[in-house]
């Protein structure tokens, strides 16, 4: 395939960015999207040009670092997958592909497609953990938990902290992310002990980072690569009301 890439280039947080155009020949439908960017960068390096900076680590859909907007969607146009799982077979020969970083004030651009997501780390540090001794595996097995609750806790725990929910939201709200981190503990007895302190601290950290409020649009759920559900936001609100 021959593709025209329009990629956001920005030297640093203070510089003004712009879209640059790159023509990519011989793109195989078998390639992953990030492999196509690797091929572009190899070409740029051979031409003594600055390669496109983009974030990635596991390339297995579990670390959450590969976030970028592709053709107007966080993680690209295919639902429920991360950018690193996006295959080039979803694109057509001759297509123009627009690639941009997350755009949200709490996620400033570091360079090109890489944004600073330490705001999420600060929220996690504020309360996304348990500090009680929950024992070893046999102890965990002796605490009976309804299957429905453990399933919901697990579904929330698969949030990879990618930030697509924030990028998709017109308010740059982090409520889906925070609600997933709250829910994974709120539904389990080990998480109930510090539940009140946790939700207050994580909401405070979320507000301090400058994320917007949730207005129930649902763009976050629609674009989340891990299908985190809006019902977690309802649980977050209930937990917050109960914390005072
Ligand atoms: S809720 Fe979904 S979109 Fe938001 S950080 Fe977690 S995995 Fe990413
Ligand atoms: S590189 Fe880890 S989720 Fe994509």
Image: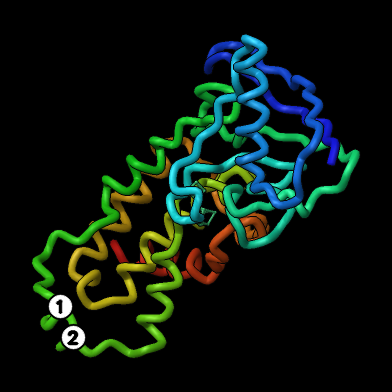
Distance from Cα at disc 1 to Cα at disc 2: 6 Å
**Contact between labelled residues 2 and 1, with CB atoms less than 8 Å apart:** yes
Which element is circle 1 on? helix
Residue 81: image location, x then y, percent: 61, 58
Residue 99: image location, x then y, percent: 71, 34
| Residue under pointer 1 | 137
Q: Say above or below: 8 vs 148.
A: above
Checking the image for residue 141, the label placed there is: 2
Q: Residue at x 66, y 17 (%)?
A: 17
Left or right of 155? Residue 54 is: right
Q: Residue at x 51, y 55 (%)?
A: 61
Badge 1 residue CB within 8 Å of ligand 1: no
Say which quarter of the image contains residue 1. top right
Q: Tell me the crowding category of disc 1: few under 14, some 14 to 19, or many 20 or more residues within 10 angstroms, Cα based.
A: few
Q: Residue at x 39, y 65 (%)?
A: 157
Q: Which quadrant of the figure contains the C terminus?
A: bottom left
Q: Nearer the viewer, residue 224 or 83?
A: 83
Which element is circle 2 on? helix
Q: Tell me the crowding category of disc 2: few under 14, some 14 to 19, or many 20 or more residues within 10 angstroms, Cα based.
A: few
Q: Say above or below: 121 vs 132.
A: above
Residue 46: image location, x then y, percent: 63, 15
Q: Say above or below: 163 vs 180.
A: above
């Amino acid at each position: 395939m021959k593709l025209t890439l329009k990629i956001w280039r920005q030297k640093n947080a203070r510089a003004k960015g712009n879209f640059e155009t790159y023509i990519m020949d011989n793109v195989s439908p078998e390639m992953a999207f990030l492999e196509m960017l690797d091929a572009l960068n190899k070409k740029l390096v051979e031409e003594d040009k600055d390669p496109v900076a983009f974030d990635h680590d596991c390339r297995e859909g579990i670390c959450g670092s590969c976030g970028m907007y592709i053709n107007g969607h966080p993680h690209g146009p295919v639902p429920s997958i991360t950018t690193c799982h996006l295959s080039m077979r979803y694109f057509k020969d001759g297509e123009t592909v627009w690639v941009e970083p997350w755009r949200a004030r709490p996620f400033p651009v570091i360079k090109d497609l890489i944004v600073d997501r330490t705001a999420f780390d600060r929220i996690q540090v504020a309360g996304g953990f348990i500090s009680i001794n929950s024992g070893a595996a046999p102890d965990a097995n002796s605490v009976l938990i309804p299957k429905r609750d453990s399933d919901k806790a697990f579904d929330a725990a698969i949030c990879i902290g990618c930030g697509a929910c924030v990028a998709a939201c017109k308010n740059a709200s982090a409520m889906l992310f925070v609600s997933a981190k709250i829910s994974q503990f709120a539904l389990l007895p080990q998480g109930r002990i510090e539940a009140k302190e946790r939700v207050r601290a994580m909401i405070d950290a979320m507000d301090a980072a400058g994320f917007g409020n949730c207005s129930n649009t649902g763009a976050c759920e629609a674009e989340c690569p891990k299908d985190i559900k809006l019902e977690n936001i309802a649980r977050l609100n209930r937990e917050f009301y109960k914390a005072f």
